[in-house]
Image (tube, grey):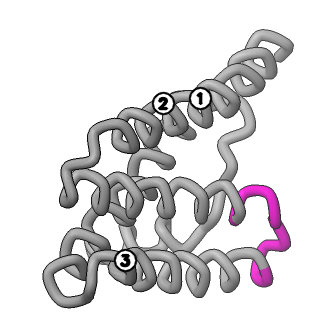
Amino acid sequence: MTFLSVILKSLKTPDDQKRDWYGWVTNQMGHFTIGVIITAVAVQLLPVHFSILPALVFAGIKESIDMFRYSSFKDSLIDWIFQGLGGIFSIVFFIKNFDILNLTIGSFLVFLAFGIIPRVRRAFRK
C-alpha cells in the first residue's frame, strides 16, 4: 500500500471514537475545517447567502454514503453539523459579523463539550 492509499482508506472508514475523546475532537476539527475551506472558496464565487450550500451539499452526500454504508445516523449527523458550523464560521467571518461569529464559536465549543464528556466517562469505565 502507498502512503496516500493508507490515508484514503482510513478517511473512508467512519468512526465515532466511542472512548477516544481526543480522536473525536480532532475528527470534528477536520469536519469543521472542511466546511470552512469549501465555504471560503464558494464565497468568492457565489453570493454570500448561497456560499454555504456547496459545503452542506458535500457534507450531505459524503455523510449519506457513510450512513448507508455503516448505518450510523448519529455519527453522520454530528459530522454534518460540524461541517455546517465551519461553513457558517466562514461566512460570518467574511461579512465581519462578530456577534454571530462569537455565537458560532460558542456553539462549536458547546457541541465539542457534549461529545467529549461521554467519551471521557466511557474511558474511565473500562
Which residue corresponds to mark 3?
49
CB atoms at circles 2 and 1 under 8 Å apart?
yes
Where on the picture, by quarter, is residue 121? top right
Q: Helix, strand or loop at disc 2?
A: helix
Closer mark to the observer between disc 3 and disc 2: 3
In 3D space, how far apart are the residues under numbered discs 3 and 1 (Cα atoms)?
25 Å
Above/below status of 75 relative to 13: above
Within-10-Å neighbours for mark 3: few <14, some 14–19, many 20+: few
| x then y, percent, for residue 13 | 60, 68
Q: Earlier in the sequence, mark 3 or mark 2?
A: 3
Above/below status of 36 relative to 49: above
Which residue corresponds to mark 2?
106
Which residue corresponds to mark 1?
110
Residue 4 falls inside the magenta stretch: no
Closer mark to the observer between disc 3 and disc 1: 3
For badge 1, the amino acid type reads Val
Above/below status of 14 relative to 58: above
**The residue stretch that appears in magenta:** 68-76
For badge 3, the amino acid type reads His
Residue at 82 percent of width and 66 percent of height: 73
Residue at 41 percent of width and 58 percent of height: 88
Within-10-Å neighbours for mark 1: few <14, some 14–19, many 20+: few
| x then y, percent, for residue 112 | 57, 32
Q: Is residue 30 left or right of residue 63?
A: left
| x then y, percent, for residue 91 | 30, 62
For badge 2, the amino acid type reads Gly
Tell me which secondary structure the magenta stretch mostly adopts: helix
In 3D space, how far apart are the residues under numbered discs 2 and 1 (Cα atoms)?
6 Å
